[in-house]
Image (cartoon, rainbow, N blue to C red):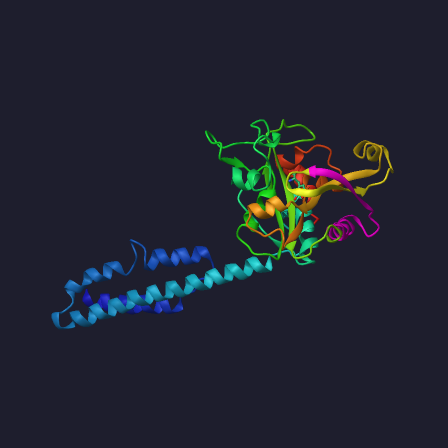
Amino acid sequence: MASEAWQKIDEVLKELELATCDNKDSLEQFRIRYLGSKNIIKPLFGEIRNVENEKKKEFGQKLNELKQKAEEKFAQFQSEVKSKERSDAQQSLDMTLPSEPYNQGSRHPISIVMNRIISIFEKIGYVVAEEREIEDDWHNFTAMNTPEDHPARDMQDTFYLKDSTQYLLRTHTSSVQSRVMTTQEPPIRIIAPGRVYRNETISARSHCQFHQVEGLYIDKDVSFADMKQTLLYFAREMYGPDTKIRLRPSYFPFTEPSAEMDVYWGLKDETDYRITKGTGWLEILGCGMVDPNVLENCKIDPDVYSGFAFGMGIERQAMLKYKISDIRLLFENDVRFLRQFSSVI
Ligand code: DAH
C-alpha cells in the first residue's frame, strides 16, 4: 500500500514535468487537477499514516515538494498564458481602423477675447491684477469718487449682499484700482480682467453678469497723450493695423477729464449701420486721467503722481468678433454653441 503511494508521487512528479499549458482552458484544467479542491495530490497526504514511522518524515517532505512544484508550474503557466494573450491582442490590432471619437475641449469666446486683450497689454509691461468679486462699498464706490447719492449705488443697479449696505457684488473692475492703489506704491501698471454684476433685466443685449478689463497706469508725469497712444496701440493690435480711433469727451466720477473711445468700424453692411447707429463708429471703452480725489483717497500724492485708467466690456467685443447676436448664449454653456470655438486658441 505504502509503496504504491511512493510510486504515485513519482508519477505525478513526472506528469508535472511534462505538463504544458498554452491557453486559458488548459490552465484551468491544470489548476483543477493539481491545485483544485479535489486535486490528485490531496489523497496522497492521507497515505502518511500507512508509511513506516522512520520514513514518514521523508514521505512528508516529498509530498510537500510535489505540492510546491505544482504551485510553481501553475504560476509559470499563468504568466505565460497571460503574456501570450497580450501579444495575440497586439497582433490583432488593426491600425487602419478609425479611432474612438475624441472630444476636444474649447475655450469660451469670453476667455479668448479676454486673453487676447491681456496679452496685448502684457507686451507693453502691464501685469495682471485679480481681485475679489464680493467687494465693500468703499473700494467699489467711495474710493472711486462716486458720491453717496450717485444712481449707480442704487439698489436698482447694485446687488448688495443680503441685509447689508456694506458688501456688494462689484459693479465694475474699477474696484481693483482702489485695491491696488491702497496696497502698492507707484509706478503701477496693471490690467484687471474679471466678472462684474449689475441688477439688469436679462435680454438679448444685457445681462446681470458680464466681464470687464480694467487698466491703470500711475507714475510721475503721465499725460493724456500717453493714454491716447496706449489706447491706439491697443486698438491696432486688437482690430488691425489700420484701425482708426477717436476720443469723445464723457463723464466718469473717477477720471477727470474723461473720455469714451470709439473705433472706426465702417459701414459695409446693414448690421454695421445698426450697431454703429449709422455713424460707422463703435464705442469700445471708457477712459480718463485718474481723478486727484481718487489718488488722495488711496493715499497717493496727486502732486507727485498722475495716471490714466480705462475700462472695457468683453461681451460686446466677443459678440462683434464672432457675430453673436444674443448675449445670453455666452452664459448658457450650451456645448453646441461652445464647440464652434474649438479651433480658436
Ligand atoms: N467703470 C466704468 C464702467 O463700468 C468703465 C470705466 C470708465 C473704467 C472709465 C475706467 C475709466 O477705468 O477710466 O462703465
Q: Can residue 43 be seen in this view?
A: yes
Q: Is residue 322 visible?
A: no
Which image quadrant is residue 202 in?
top right
Residue under the point 71% across and 43% down: 257
In the rendered image, which quarter contains the N terminus? bottom left
Which image quadrant is residue 141 in?
top right
| Span shown in magenta | 227-251
- Quarter, ligand 1: top right
336 on left or right of 90: right
Q: Return the residue nearer the eye: 288 or 314.
A: 288
169 on left or right of 286: left
Which image quadrant is residue 254 in?
top right
Residue 297 against residue 222 in the figure, above or below: above
Q: State the image coordinates of residue 108 (x, y, percent, origin top left).
A: 65, 43
Residue under the point 36% across and 57% down: 31
Q: Does the magenta stretch include residue 247?
A: yes
Q: Is residue 13 magenta?
A: no
